[in-house]
Image (tube, helix red, strand yellow):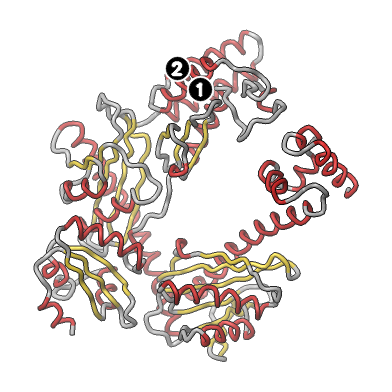
């Protein structure tokens, strides 16, 4: 059947969709020439993940487009829609933090991740793949410049005012020129000019020393050292202020290492490198990576430098930015630097990646053999948590080929009043797989529940009602609450300790448990706080929300002064809140 289809393929641009024996799309690719590209999967030897992909192909479809640009756009949309197993291996789901200087009457300096929610006129600097560095810079700026620190202005001065890290915008009338001078200096520093900030810290240091305040002088000395470390970036010196991202790569046919340099103000302010299994051609893998890199939360620069294997015109049309392959001079030098660093990453990481890949994949195969399941790849694991029948939640984590796939994780807040283990499992399994059916989502090869016969029976009952045939097994724990065996098809399968399968199951159980417990603690703390506030006269849904937003915990509300409560509540209600907590002690 595949041979016949290959003969009918046209010499035209388009997308191809590879399917497995269950008719599930496992890979989506695009090609300038569909016949030439798709044929290469079946007329030559492959290695690594490409070999696994080819072994799992049972059928394929294709869609012809008018141009290669249309093919690339269609490929990106199809990958988003179907989330194919082999495409997600090359996806980087990280979102880089940025430093934001807000465009408010009294501006603030913050670390933000979702730049899409920023208000008009705010200034963003970054990205910073190293979140610790971003926070350290913001802490440094907030200590040296007394800008506003609080989220919303209060009627009383706060601690920052008393330690001289805020000018007291809530109680004083501040000259706008003072604020503008501070923000101008901050902008210069974040663009790479550290001289003004260094000079300011030096002045503070000598002033403290002259006043015999040696503790303050030492603090300033340490801050000055931090500035030097933060500002010690690779100088490229393009003599312009153009933001650029530079992509380099290196490949050995089995893995591809991708290096990204972020150039801001003529300097490499940050770099990031990643290693991925190579499924497709190098140029296709790198093109897809770059497109998906800017599809999320990362800001596009004015220019993108790429190696000569990339079609610059095609990528430029998709990204709507200038994409070039430098041929000479400093620009060529920085591209070569990115390529050299990618090669170093490849050499450093591929052996570890190979071992981890082999260990995870073999453990998954071995688990499949124990359960008599062919093609065991996607496993969905459920864990439930409740406190004496209250604040009931469930969490689902996903493992693909023995590795966690965090984009697939889901949380469930249980709505039923019947929250015993049996009914709790029925609700969450129904909600998950009803959605799988309705939205045509990827189905797992195996469902693992953290429990015994009751939970397995509940899951099977719901799956049968939904007419889904998905095998279900349960984790059986020993007296030390450690996984010791599996319950599957009325059989108890003992798992030998310290084997790859044992470690895989242990990791799955731990991941599901920790994910669910984190969610449970969050729900429990919010629920406890809300339930207490419901008992206070004069506190309705709106005021409850304001209290939650400002204080966040019962302890903070208990310790709040009348003045702090009065800032968001009428005086009568503030007194009632204070009286309630005093009587409760």
Q: Is residue 582 left or right of residue 521?
A: right
The one of 202 and 68 positioned closer to us in this rendering:
68
Mark identifier at residue 224: 1
Seen at 37% across and 80% down, the residue is 375
Location of residue 100 in the rendering, given as x and y in whole percent from the top left corner: 47, 34
Placement of the N terminus among the 4 image quadrants:
bottom left
Direction top: furthest residue: 210
Seen at 17% across and 63% down, the residue is 65
Q: Residue under label 2, please give it.
A: 196
Q: Can residue 419 be seen at all in this image of the molecule?
A: yes
Label 2: how many Cα within 10 Å (few below 14, some 14–19, many 20+): few
Residue 108 falls in image quadrant: top right
Location of residue 129 in the rendering, given as x and y in whole percent from the top left corner: 42, 43
Q: Can residue 494 be seen at all in this image of the molecule?
A: no
Location of residue 363 in the rendering, given as x and y in whole percent from the top left corner: 43, 74
Q: Is residue 220 left or right of residue 239?
A: right
Task: Examine the rendered structure and indicate whether residue 418 appears above or below residue 134.
Answer: below
The one of 349 and 527 positioned closer to us in this rendering:
527
Seen at 50% across and 84% down, the residue is 466
Location of residue 203 in the rendering, given as x and y in whole percent from the top left corner: 53, 12
Alpha carbon separation for disc pair 1 and 2? 12 Å
Task: Examine the rendered structure and indicate whether residue 289 appears above or below residue 197.
Answer: below
Labels 1, 2: front one: 2
Where disc 1 sits, the SS reads helix
Task: Examine the rendered structure and indicate whether residue 455 appears above or below residue 325.
Answer: below
The one of 237 and 301 positioned closer to us in this rendering:
301
Label 1: how many Cα within 10 Å (few below 14, some 14–19, many 20+): many
């Amino acid at each position: 059947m595949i041979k016949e289809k290959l003969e009918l393929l046209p010499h035209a641009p388009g997308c191809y969709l590879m399917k497995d024996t269950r008719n599930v799309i496992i890979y989506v690719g695009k090609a300038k020439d569909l016949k030439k590209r798709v044929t290469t999967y079946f007329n030559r030897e492959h290695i690594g993940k490409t070999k696994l992909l080819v072994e799992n192909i049972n059928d394929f479809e294709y869609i012809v487009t008018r141009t290669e640009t249309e093919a690339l756009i269609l490929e990106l949309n199809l990958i988003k829609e179907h989330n194919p197993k082999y495409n997600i291996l090359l996806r980087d789901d990280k979102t880089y933090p940025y430093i934001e200087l807000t465009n408010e009457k009294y501006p603030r300096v913050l670390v933000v991740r979702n730049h899409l929610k920023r208000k008009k006129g705010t200034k963003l600097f970054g990205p910073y793949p190293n979140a610790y560095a971003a926070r350290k810079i913001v802490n440094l700026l907030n200590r040296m410049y007394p800008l506003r620190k609080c989220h919303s202005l209060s009627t009383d001065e706060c601690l920052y005012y008393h330690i001289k890290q805020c000018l007291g915008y809530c109680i004083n009338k501040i000259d706008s020129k003072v604020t503008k001078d501070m923000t101008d200096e901050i902008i210069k520093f974040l663009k790479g000019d550290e001289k003004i900030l260094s000079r300011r810290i030096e002045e503070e240091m000598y002033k403290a020393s002259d006043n015999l305040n040696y503790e303050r002088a030492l603090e300033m000395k340490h801050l000055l050292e931090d500035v030097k470390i933060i500002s010690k970036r690779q100088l490229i010196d393009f003599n312009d202020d153009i933001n650029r991202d530079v992509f380099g790569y290196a490949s050995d046919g089995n893995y591809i290492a991708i290096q990204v340099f972020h150039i801001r103000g003529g300097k490499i302010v940050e770099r990031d490198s990643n290693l991925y299994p190579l499924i497709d051609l190098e140029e296709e893998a790198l093109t897809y990576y770059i497109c998906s890199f800017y599809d999320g939360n990362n800001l596009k620069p004015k220019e993108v430098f790429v190696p000569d294997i990339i079609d610059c015109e095609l990528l430029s049309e998709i990204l709507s930015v200038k994409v070039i392959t430098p041929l000479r001079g400093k620009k060529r030098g920085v591209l070569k630097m990115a390529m050299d660093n990618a090669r170093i990453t490849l050499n450093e990481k591929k052996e570890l990646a190979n071992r981890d890949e082999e260990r995870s994949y073999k453990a998954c195969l071995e688990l499949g053999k124990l359960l008599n399941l062919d093609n065991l790849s996607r496993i969905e694991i459920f864990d439930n948590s409740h406190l004496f029948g209250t604040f009931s939640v469930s969490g689902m984590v996903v493992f693909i080929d023995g590795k966690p796939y965090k984009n697939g994780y889901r949380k469930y807040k249980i709505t039923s009043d019947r929250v015993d283990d049996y009914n709790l499992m029925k609700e969450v399994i129904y909600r998950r797989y009803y959605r799988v059916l309705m939205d045509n989502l990827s189905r797992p090869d195996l469902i693992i529940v953290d429990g015994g016969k009751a939970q397995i029976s509940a899951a099977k009952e719901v799956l049968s009602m939904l007419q889904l045939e998905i095998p279900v097994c349960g984790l059986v724990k020993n007296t030390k609450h450690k996984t010791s065996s599996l319950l599957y098809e009325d059989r108890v399968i003992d798992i030998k300790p310290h084997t790859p399968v044992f470690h895989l199951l242990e990791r799955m159980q731990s991941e599901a448990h920790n994910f669910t417990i984190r969610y449970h603690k969050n729900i429990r703390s919010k629920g406890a706080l809300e339930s207490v506030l419901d008992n206070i006269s004069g506190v309705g849904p709106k005021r409850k929300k304001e209290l939650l937003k400002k204080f966040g915990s019962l302890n903070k509300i208990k310790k709040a002064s009348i003045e702090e409560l009065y800032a968001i509540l009428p005086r009568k209600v503030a007194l009632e809140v204070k009286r309630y907590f005093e009587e409760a002690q």
